[in-house]
């Protein structure tokens, strides 16, 4: 339940739109999801061995510390707090408001929900030796506060409070919402593949399955930055488009953070990882097939621009403006990228999109709860080793790391106000891939250094499985560094900043702190 609860959130209902704009053809879109599935399952197999060998609270932090040194464990924890985990919490909370906008446009994310807009000119360029011209890594013309950001903040505060009441309360919320989100996902699959399937759309998608979107702005920009041909640039852009699908399948490793609280973790942790990741990936592939059975992959860009302009002029009529246009807009131009609700709008006009929006809101709510529930255990474990604020290593009267939960919520809220959903995705996924790759390399190191270590589960196909996973992560990171430097380089720099922070922390930590 916890693996599925952490994995299934907002992404599967949103990211296919942006991916479709990048790659164009249905075949390319499906290939990216299949590659994501392969990477996720391979990673799950590797982490299953590590979780069985080190059944302690802390997950990746513990694995890296044991395989390499406390420095590597700290760098992961530092990155998780500043970018990976808190960024994921912020991104999914923001996604909740995207679908709230279906019910009450003023409360959703978007220009119609702006409460405060203050001019601010910030432009930070990045120039690297192979770039013909600099790219902007951070740019803001206005600081805005929207109703969507306030609601996302409220969700984070509410779920943090619930989890402070005790593990059982947080777990109960998680179980209820996990069942609800899996039902929502199943509903899209059934409606798309059995009820609303349009064979003319299917034939059109199959006919253009392998037509790449060679004229996209991102391909042109990549050619400018790398001086490569359009097909090579498309390959880079397609790889970068996997950010969305990888984010949707991310958080599968979060279950390892709670290993210290699981019965028989040596058996149950590997079982949860392998079965949980496989089940969710199968549902994701079916969900995308359902999208393609109802909606054309490439929608009408001119119509999308016209409807968006009209909705901005008359925000109160947004719902009626877009009504009945879902099929023409397709996957790539779905309103606010809400592909899941677009399918339901076609399958059952009227109540369908509303019901689906409610289901996806339940899904995102449960996903935020799952991340809040498990991630605070990471900072608790670090604090116990003297590598995080001492107060984060304390438990309240109910046995919950309350201080750790509050710190996590506070930084997540800051990130809610710092960027958009897509920006948060780009910042998060590169840092995640970096530490997934290093952790899997640690599995190989541990096999060599500690051959006698008790391993209730051993990854099949060793060393091929971890090597293939490591190479795939490496290829994705190189792709992102070239195709999206404005997002990936800041993440890499932030990880690097953790090195002086670590040695500074070691120098000033209290004498009674534990840890090696």
Image (tube, grey):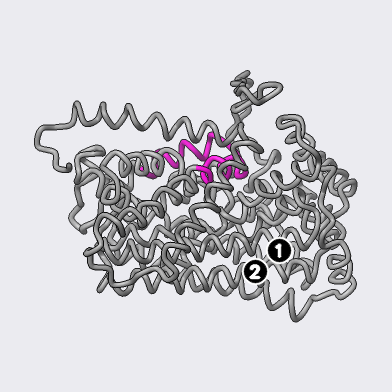
Query: Mark 2 near mark 1, Cβ–Cβ under 8 Å?
Result: yes
Q: Quadrant of residue 489?
A: top right
Tell me where residue 470 appears, x and y as whole percent: 48, 53
Helix, strand or loop at label 2? It is helix
Question: Which of the labelled discs sits on residue 30, or is there none?
Answer: 1
Q: Is residue 298 left or right of residue 190?
A: right
The residue lying toward the viewer, choosing from 494 and 63, is: 63
The residue lying toward the viewer, choosing from 308 and 43, is: 43
Q: Is residue 349 left or right of residue 175?
A: right
Residue 464 colored magenta?
no
- Considering the image in quadrants, where does the N terminus appear? bottom left
Q: Which residue is mark 2?
A: 285
Q: Which region shows up in magenta?
A: 408-430
Q: Quadrant of residue 268?
A: bottom left
Counting residues from the start of the chain, the first of labels 2 and 1 encountered is 1
Tell me where residue 211 appears, x and y as whole percent: 84, 56
Q: Residue at x 75, y 43 (%)?
A: 232
Q: Determine if residue 332 is in view.
A: yes
Q: Residue furthest top?
A: 121
Tell me where residue 249 appears, x and y as whole percent: 54, 59
Residue 423 colored magenta?
yes
- Considering the image in quadrants, where does the C terminus appear? top left
């Amino acid at each position: 339940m916890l693996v599925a609860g952490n994995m299934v959130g907002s992404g599967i209902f949103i990211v296919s739109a942006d991916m479709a704009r990048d790659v164009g053809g249905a075949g390319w879109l499906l290939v990216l999801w299949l590659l994501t599935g392969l990477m996720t399952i391979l990673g799950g197999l590797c982490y299953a061995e590590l979780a069985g060998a080190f059944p302690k609270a802390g997950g990746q932090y513990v694995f890296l510390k044991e395989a390499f040194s406390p420095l590597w464990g700290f760098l992961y924890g530092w990155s998780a707090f500043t970018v990976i985990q808190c960024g994921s919490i912020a991104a999914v909370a923001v996604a909740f408001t995207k679908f709230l906008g279906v019910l009450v446009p003023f409360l959703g994310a978007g220009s119609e929900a702006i409460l405060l807009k203050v001019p601010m000119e910030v432009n930070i360029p990045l120039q690297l030796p192979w770039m013909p011209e600099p790219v902007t890594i951070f740019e803001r013309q206005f600081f805005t506060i929207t109703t969507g950001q306030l609601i996302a903040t409220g969700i984070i505060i509410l779920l943090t409070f619930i989890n402070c009441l005790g593990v059982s309360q947080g777990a109960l919320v998680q179980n209820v919402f996990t069942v609800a989100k899996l039902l929502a996902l199943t509903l899209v699959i059934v409606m798309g593949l059995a009820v609303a399937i349009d064979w003319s759309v299917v034939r059109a998608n199959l006919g253009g399955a392998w037509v790449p979107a060679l004229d996209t702005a991102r391909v042109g920009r990549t050619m400018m930055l790398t001086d490569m041909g359009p097909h090579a640039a498309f390959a880079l852009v397609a790889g970068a488009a996997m950010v969305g699908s990888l984010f949707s399948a991310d958080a599968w490793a979060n279950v390892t953070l709670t290993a210290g609280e699981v019965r028989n973790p040596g058996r149950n942790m590997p079982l949860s990882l392998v079965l949980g990741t496989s089940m969710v990936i199968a549902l994701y592939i079916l969900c995308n097939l359902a999208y393609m059975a109802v909606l054309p992959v490439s929608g009408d860009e001119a119509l999308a621009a016209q409807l968006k302009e009209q909705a901005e002029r008359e925000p109160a009529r947004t719902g009626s403006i877009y009504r009945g246009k879902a099929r023409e807009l397709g996957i790539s131009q779905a309103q606010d990228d809400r592909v899941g609700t677009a399918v339901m709008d076609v399958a059952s006009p009227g109540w369908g999109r509303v019901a689906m929006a409610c289901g996806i809101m339940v899904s995102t709510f449960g996903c935020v709860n799952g991340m809040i529930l498990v991630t605070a255990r990471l900072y608790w474990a670090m604090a116990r080793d003297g590598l995080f604020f001492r107060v984060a290593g304390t438990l309240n009267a109910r046995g919950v790391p309350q201080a750790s939960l509050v710190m996590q919520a506070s930084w997540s809220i800051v990130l809610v106000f710092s960027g958009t959903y897509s920006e948060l995705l780009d910042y998060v996924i590169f840092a995640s891939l970096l530490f997934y790759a290093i952790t899997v390399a640690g599995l190989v190191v541990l096999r060599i250094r500690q051959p006698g270590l008790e391993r209730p589960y051993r990854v099949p196909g060793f060393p091929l499985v971890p090597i293939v996973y490591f190479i795939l992560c490496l290829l994705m990171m190189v792709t992102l560094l070239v195709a999206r430097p404005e997002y990936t380089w800041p993440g890499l720099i932030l990880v690097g900043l953790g090195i002086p922070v670590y040695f500074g922390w070691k120098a000033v930590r209290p004498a009674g702190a534990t840890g090696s």
